[in-house]
Image (cartoon, rainbow, N blue to C red):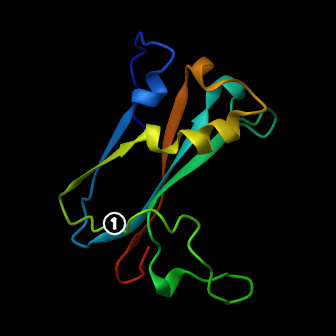
Amino acid sequence: MQPAAPFQAGSDWLNQMTISLVNRTNKTIVFGSIILHFLDTGDCSSSLPCASTTLEFGQRPAVDAFDGRTGKPVKPEHPERPPLDWKSDQTLVIHVSDYLAEIEQQLANSLPLTAVTKVNIYRGVFYFGDGMH
């Protein structure tokens, strides 16, 4: 994890935030996710959990789109989102504003979006076109 220097920002900083990711593999990525932990709601430990949300982009490959418990296919959670065609060495820019409704829903019982001052960003799961993740 790379620490970031604190910075001055307005109350809409999260709405303005973009996250740039580089595909450093030699395969095309079709689905990915990143996880945001909101440290203003807790320290994310077992004794003081924090609010978090997962931002998903692209579509899981059909070979991986099944329920691990039942083995039955699952429908995409966000069929309106376009599939990724994220090639090797390309940069993908995630606009956090595209996910504000999901973020606000996760924060609804904790604090307003404009009160967020600290966020940790973690890599989630990524799927290649061949189904490997």
What residue lies at 74% left-to-right and 87% top-to-bottom? Answer: 70
Residue 99 position in % (x across, y down) = 51, 44
Residue 23 position in % (x across, y down) = 26, 59
Image position of 88 (left or right of 105): left
**Residue farthest toward the right in the current orientation of the protein:** 47
Q: How crowded is mark 1: few (under 14 residues within 10 Å), some or many (20 or more)?
A: some
Q: Is mark 1 on a helix, strand or loop?
A: loop
Residue at which label 1 appears: 84
- Looking at this view, is 40 or 99 the one in front? 99
Q: Tell me the amino acid under the disc marked 1.
A: Leu
Residue 127 position in % (x across, y down) = 42, 71
Which quadrant does the N terminus fall into? top left
Q: In this rendering, is residue 56 above or below 85?
A: above
**Residue farthest toward the top in the current orientation of the protein:** 8
Image position of 79 (left or right of 22): right
**Residue farthest toward the front in the current orientation of the protein:** 80
